[in-house]
Image: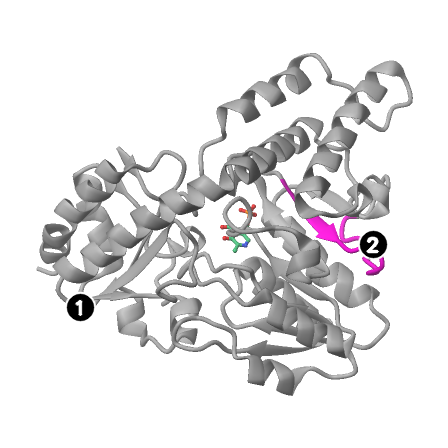
């Protein structure tokens, strides 16, 4: 099986499994307990928090461990917007993941105004439109670092500068970027950042939200006051340890891995555009995630192409894994100006640590006939 769906989920790294095992079998206390067994667990949790903060160039106390990207996004959007006394106005981009868009919708239901800023044909945020919607009562801007469906990487520093000029906190969903792109929050200029461990070799159901210390954050989960009152619930020490080990491993390997994946990605993109009639790349040609290649194949249903590819042992996705069972055209592709019919032909290949040049060549050999068969 050739697995090219790493943006949906990537297998845990071996070193993650090795680091997690003792926390499932030996160091099994509750880190909130004051006895020795609890203190041992707390030491593991603290070390994990330090390790994550180090990669972000942040303070450990600013890291909130969560059950993944969805919870981190919910906590960021709701927690920052509602704690900010400036007003009740929120800004998001049109191509956010549902974890952000649906949370913004829920805020709208509760009386917030939400402005949705569009993107250009490559998926890059319309900065002029952003300037036009920022207001003195804006409580939060949320724009993702890199898009899951089209791979486009946003100019975070430029967006951050605009938010800073307005004194508005800036959150970024870095779920697809973490492990692939620089994460130093000082350099990025963001005030809050969400990440999900299973996208960079950690465990599913684990992740974190980083929030700059000066930014007020209201909790979404109420209870025992864990994570400094920002996320109640008994801490999952093993998952936090796995998240930290995965993030560190990804950061250490990042430079070489980005070069390797970018070259494989470009080979795939160039090959597909040259050999598959009607193929169109979605997202920006170069300002995109290193291992991300996404296309539309005019007139050919994306799901049918996936089925043909699976017949020959290649698995990928039709855009976003979350929307795979929905017939609706992708809101991301529609936002880039692609019409609904073409949007339904989307196919996404996302590469990861296991991907090789031989696999890319196998895709390039199989795809023209898969698209042809799917089009019959
Ligand atoms: N944000 C983006 C951009 C994603 O791609 C995903 C998952 O695919 C999420 C958020 C949700 O993350 P999780 O699966 O950890 O809840």
Q: Residue furthest top?
A: 26
Report the quarter where the N terminus lies: top left
> Residue at 16% across / 67% down in the picture?
278
Is residue 139 left or right of 255 when viewed as pictured? right
Q: Is mark 2 within 8 Å of ligand 1?
A: no
Q: Residue 105 at what x, y percent from top left?
A: 62, 69
Residue 216 inside the magenta-drawn segment: yes
> Residue at 52% across / 79% down in the picture?
126
Task: State which tag comes first along the sequence, 2 or 1.
Answer: 2
Quarter occupied by residue 166 = bottom right
Q: Residue 373 at what x, y percent from top left?
A: 9, 54
Mark 1 secondary-structure assignment: loop
The residue mark sitting in front, 2 or 1, is 2
* Vertical comparison of 100 with 38: above or below: below
Q: Residue furthest right?
A: 34
Q: How many marks?
A: 2
Report the quarter where the C terminus lies: bottom left
Is residue 224 left or right of 129 when viewed as pictured? right
Q: Residue 302 at what x, y percent from top left?
A: 25, 58
> Residue at 49% across / 30% down in the picture?
12
Q: Residue 92 at what x, y percent from top left?
A: 61, 71
Q: Mark on residue 299? A: 1
Over which residues does the magenta segment extend? 207-221
Give 262 or 293, whichever is nearer the viewer.
262
Query: Can residue 9 be seen from the camera position used here?
Result: no
* Vertical comparison of 270 with 88: above or below: above
Magenta portion: prevailing SS class? loop
Residue 230 inside the magenta-drawn segment: no
Measure the alpha-carbon separation of dots 2 and 1. Answer: 50 Å
Q: Mark on residue 315? A: none
Is residue 191 left or right of 227 when viewed as pictured? left
- The residue to which callout 2 is attached is 213
């Amino acid at each position: 099986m050739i697995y090219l769906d790493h943006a949906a989920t990537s297998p845990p790294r071996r070193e993650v499994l090795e680091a997690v095992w003792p926390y499932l079998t030996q160091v099994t206390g509750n880190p909130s307990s004051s006895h020795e067994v609890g203190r041992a667990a707390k030491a593991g949790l603290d070390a994990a928090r330090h390790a994550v903060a180090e990669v972000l160039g942040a303070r450990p106390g600013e890291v909130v461990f969560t059950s993944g990207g969805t919870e981190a996004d919910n906590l960021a959007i709701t927690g920052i917007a509602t704690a900010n006394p400036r007003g009740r106005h929120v800004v998001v981009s049109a191509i956010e993941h549902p974890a952000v868009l649906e949370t913004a919708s829920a805020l709208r239901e509760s009386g917030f105004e939400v402005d949705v800023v569009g993107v250009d044909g490559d998926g890059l945020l319309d900065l002029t439109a952003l300037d036009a919607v920022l207001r003195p009562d804006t409580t939060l801007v949320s724009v993702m670092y890199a898009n899951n469906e089209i791979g486009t990487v946003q100019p975070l520093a430029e967006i951050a500068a605009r938010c800073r000029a307005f004194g508005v906190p800036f959150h970024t969903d870095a779920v697809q970027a973490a492990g692939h792109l620089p994460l130093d929050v000082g350099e990025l200029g963001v005030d809050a950042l969400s990440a999900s461990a299973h996208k960079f070799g950690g465990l599913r159901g684990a992740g974190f939200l980083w929030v700059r210390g000066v930014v007020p954050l209201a909790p979404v989960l109420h209870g025992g006051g864990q994570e400094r009152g920002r996320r109640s619930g008994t801490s999952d020490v093993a998952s936090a340890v796995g998240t930290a080990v995965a993030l560190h491993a990804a950061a250490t390997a990042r430079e070489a891995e980005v070069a390797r994946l970018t070259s494989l990605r470009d080979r795939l993109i160039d090959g597909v555009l040259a050999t598959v009639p009607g193929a169109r790349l979605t997202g920006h040609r170069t300002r995109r995630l290193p291992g991300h290649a996404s296309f539309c194949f005019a007139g050919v249903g994306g799901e049918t192409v996936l089925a043909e590819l699976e017949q020959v042992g290649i698995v990928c996705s039709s855009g976003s894994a979350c929307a795979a069972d929905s017939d609706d055209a992708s809101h991301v592709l529609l936002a880039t100006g692609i019409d609904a019919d073409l949007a339904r032909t989307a196919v996404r290949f996302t590469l990861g640590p296991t991907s090789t040049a031989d696999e890319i060549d196998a895709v390039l050999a199989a795809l023209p006939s898969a698209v042809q068969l799917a089009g019959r």
